[in-house]
Amino acid sequence: MVTAAVLLCLGMQAGPAEAARRAPSFPWDDLFGTRPQRPHKAVRRAAVPLPKPRPAQAPAAAHVPAATAPEPPAAETQSPAAPAEAARPSERAKPVEAAKPAEPAAPQLSACRQALTEEIAIAPSIPDIHGAGGCGGEDLVRLEAIVLADKRKVAVKPAAILRCKMAAAVVDWVRTDIAPLAQSLGGGISNLDNFDSFECRGRNRVAGAQLSEHGRANALDVRALGLANGKSISLTDRGVSRALRETVLHSVCARFSTVLGPGSDWYHEDHIHLDLIERRNNYRICQWNVDDPLPQVAPLLPAERPEEAPPREVAAKSDASKTDAPRIDQGKANHGKSDAGKKPNGTKSDDAAAPDRSAETKTQPTKKRRQSRRF
């Protein structure tokens, strides 16, 4: 009893907090709710500072997907600055719209491409070609037609794949030189016969040869010019007027670096090769032989000898051409005849009256004559 009283007095002096801390605990205190509850400290809630609003001239922020964006803390939603930001939803959406990936800028057109408009040629651009051994090129076009000053179109058959500078040179050549020339022939030019343009190959299609200008899309082979009246003028045909072919020769040699035609080699006997290769000191090659036209009718038989022509001189036959008859000693022959015709007493024999049968017999050909007859 004394012990219990002492404990009770100590508990009253220590205060309720100390008594609760020192009071013994039993397992059934929580079950029956007899365990005293400890007072909790008052929670002091402090305001979280918010960042300043993003200036308008600041660069666009990286786009963060909505699913992975962290949620704002509860204190931020309850801050006094939250209503001000909520009142400006358009400003918060601007960085998201500006974060879209920028589209790649279109490649800048070359000066040649800008000058080659649809008013002078139908030549759409095509992607660059990069092949093996340096084959291909850049700033390529597909030349489909040439537009003349009167808006008529000269078709390129088939369409030629060329570099822009080479295509522009061909267009200027046709518009300036060929169109006026063809106008006087048959109503103007209607098409250009393209024998070959871009082809990844060596010169003259020889294996292992140096890369041709055709492999660089810098050459064009022209075979003929089509007229509006349906006729076709082959530039290598000898039946075409020589003056016309010479006019075309002078025009192409003044515009292109290389001109190869008949007479250069047997690879260019049926077409004209044109290219714009760059050489030292602006050296040019122009090899095209403009041959004379062939005769209309080839003489098959010699002409008849005119009546007023002097008589032909006939050469006298030589002795060697005569028949090589066996030679007989005239003395012996005469002696034989005299002896055969006379008797020993000086009278003629009876055989003299008989005809000379030996003279009738023909002389047999000699061995030499027989051999000559065989040939």
Image (tube, rainbow, N blue to C red):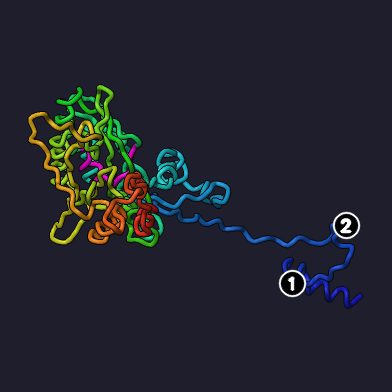
Give residue 148's quadrant in the image.
top left
Give residue 336's quadrant in the image.
bottom left
62 relative to 300, above or below: below
Residue 150 at x, y percent in the picture: 18, 24
Q: Find numbered disc 2 in the image and state the secondary structure of the residue it sits on.
A: helix
Q: Find numbered disc 1 in the image and state the secondary structure of the residue it sits on.
A: helix
Answer with left or right where residue 147 lies relative to residue 56. left
Residue 117 at x, y percent in the picture: 24, 35
Q: Residue at x 25, y 35 (%)?
A: 300
204 relative to 242, above or below: below
Pick whichever, 307 or 240, lies toward us. Answer: 307
Residue 41 at x, y percent in the picture: 64, 61
The residue that disc 1 covers is 13
The residue that disc 2 covers is 32
**C-alpha gap between disc 1 and disc 2:** 27 Å
Kind of residue at badge 2 = Phe
Q: Is residue 325 visible?
A: no
Numbered disc in front, either 1 or 2:
2
Q: Is residue 163 magenta?
A: yes
Residue 13 at x, y percent in the picture: 74, 72
Q: Is residue 209 visible?
A: yes
179 relative to 54, above or below: above
Answer with left or right where residue 31 lies relative to residue 218. right
Q: Which residues are magenta?
A: 159-171
156 relative to 373, above or below: above
Q: Where, quadrant-wise, is the N terminus in this rendering?
A: bottom right
Estimate how packed mark 1 is, as few (under 14), some (14 to 19) or many (20 or more) residues with alpha carbons within 10 Å: few
Q: Residue at x 22, y 31 (%)?
A: 297
Pick whichever, 120 or 108, lies toward us. Answer: 120
